[in-house]
Image: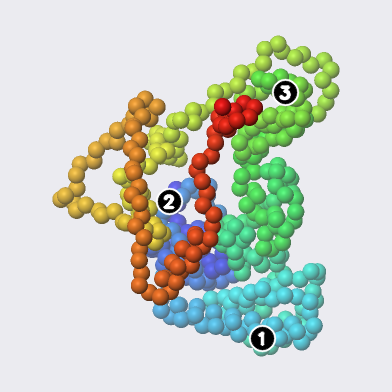
């Protein structure tokens, strides 16, 4: 075992081991370390700890000292110098007419070396540019051409998921990503949907690739010949996440059905002929579905404390119901907020009893309420009096209907055929 500390340099997400040389370094402390390029100013992300010897790359570089105030001022001066060098280099690139894009500038801690990072479509002859920059800064000048993925890692940004770029946050090195991963995960092959900010395939396609490959190895392929509880058929589609397949049955090909992997028997995996395949007489059994009347069960992942039943119905005496009735929307509609009892006046909670069924109770007698005649309201105002006169005049002009109608089945009185003499 070797005692080391973890160091992370500016603009990087990879940790490097250094020999503390007997110093006790706390996380978040800035130190000066010795590297292959000289002295560097870096931050400690993990203090003194033991690691196996096979995890350490020899020779292990030492920690020179814990950063002082002078070291901090030197680092701040180098940051200002980098901003000035960035603007001067852009002007020089435009003056020489070079087709290159300047990305970032880094100045060494000792100030004797400046590195310029740029991107370009092809090879660029920047020999004259290096001479101009060396005459301006009086230091060793180095130009490095990087790719678009390195550019995104240096500059950072937000991905289409809304989170910071993975390469800028925690990825230590770029992982190879291929279009085959998108096909395995049944993603859209549209380049705009599976490409990141850098224009290359998204690094997150690699994260769940192992789980998809494991599920694909246990599930049948498309056009496989399978036996189901409802008969034999061919697989039309495969859902790797739910581990279900959609089967087009021979007896009902127009209506495909969905089955779980455990409910089917694979007779032939993949495309091919059915000749020579023995079809068993007994079909697989269908698994029972979960009872909808029972409340759903939510498991705590990784805690090992068992299932937690989730109530399907919220009783009115719970605080959710009080918040709903006390909301602004219900107050605007005329509902009165419920008064919360004081702690000393709060009654013990009574269990809610089951209501009796209505079909077992005798019907209640309906009480009839006699309506009293409405008394006319007299008004002394001139307008209402005139309106009352007009209404009375209209009623007098209408003919009076008689209620002495004859019954349709009653024989007419009087003389004549069928009448009573």
Residue displayed at 49% across by 64% down: 393
Residue displayed at 60% across by 57% down: 161
Which residue is denoted by mark 3 in the rendering? 226
The image quarter in which residue 237 lies: top right
Which residue is denoted by mark 1 in the rendering? 88
Asked whether, in this view, residue 133 is left or right of residue 357, the answer is: right
Q: Secondary structure at mark 2?
A: strand
Residue displayed at 75% across by 33% down: 236
Q: Secondary structure at mark 3?
A: strand
Please state which of residues 13 and 326 is positioned toward the viewer in this rendering.
326
Which residue is denoted by mark 2 in the rendering? 50
The first of marks 1 and 2 along the sequence is 2
The spot of residue 56 in percent (x, y) is 52, 52
- Position of 243 relative to 208 (above/below): above
- In this view, the residue farthest toward the bottom is 136
The spot of residue 274 in percent (x, y) is 82, 20
The spot of residue 90 in percent (x, y) is 70, 82
Q: Secondary structure at mark 1?
A: helix
């Amino acid at each position: 075992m070797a005692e080391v500390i973890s160091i992370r340099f500016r603009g990087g997400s990879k940790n490097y081991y250094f020999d503390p040389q007997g110093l006790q370094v706390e996380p978040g402390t800035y130190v000066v370390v010795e590297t292959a390029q000289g002295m560097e100013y870096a931050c400690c992300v993990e203090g003194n700890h033991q690691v196996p010897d096979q995890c350490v790359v020899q020779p292990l570089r030492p920690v020179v000292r814990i950063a002082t105030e002078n070291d901090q001022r030197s680092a701040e001066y180098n940051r200002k110098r980098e901003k000035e060098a960035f603007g001067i280099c852009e002007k020089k690139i435009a003056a020489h007419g070079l087709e290159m894009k300047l990305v970032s500038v880094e100045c060494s801690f000792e100030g004797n070396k400046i590195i310029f990072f740029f991107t370009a479509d092809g090879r660029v002859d920047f020999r004259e540019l290096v001479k101009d920059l060396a005459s301006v800064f009086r230091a060793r000048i180095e130009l490095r051409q990087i790719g678009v993925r390195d550019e995104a890692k240096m500059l950072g940004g937000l991905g289409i998921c809304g989170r910071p770029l993975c390469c800028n946050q925690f990825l230590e090195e770029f992982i190879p990503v291929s279009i085959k991963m998108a096909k395995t995960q049944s993603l859209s092959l549209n380049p705009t949907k599976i490409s990141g900010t850098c224009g290359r395939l998204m690094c997150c396609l690699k994260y769940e690739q192992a789980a998809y490959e494991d599920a694909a190895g246990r599930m049948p392929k498309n056009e496989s010949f399978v036996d189901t509880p409802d008969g034999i058929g061919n697989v039309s589609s495969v859902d790797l996440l739910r581990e279900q397949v959609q089967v087009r049955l021979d007896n009902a090909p127009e209506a495909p059905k969905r089955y779980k992997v455990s409910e089917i028997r694979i007779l032939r995996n993949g495309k091919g002929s059915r000749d020579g395949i023995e079809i068993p007489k007994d079909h697989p059994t269908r698994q029972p579905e979960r009872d909808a009347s029972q409340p759903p069960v939510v498991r705590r992942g990784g805690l090992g404390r068992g299932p937690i039943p989730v109530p399907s119905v919220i009783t009115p005496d719970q605080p959710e119901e009080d918040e709903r009735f006390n909301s602004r929307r219900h107050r605007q509609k005329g509902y009165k907020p419920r008064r919360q009892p004081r702690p000393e006046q709060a009654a013990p909670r009574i269990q809610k009893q089951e209501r009796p069924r209505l079909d077992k109770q005798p019907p209640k007698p309906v009480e009839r309420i006699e309506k009293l005649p409405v008394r006319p309201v007299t008004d002394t105002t001139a307008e209402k009096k005139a309106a009352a006169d007009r209404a009375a005049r209209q009623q007098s002009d209408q003919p009076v209907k008689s209620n002495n109608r004859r019954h349709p089945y009653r024989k007419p009185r009087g003389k004549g055929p069928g009448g009573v003499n």
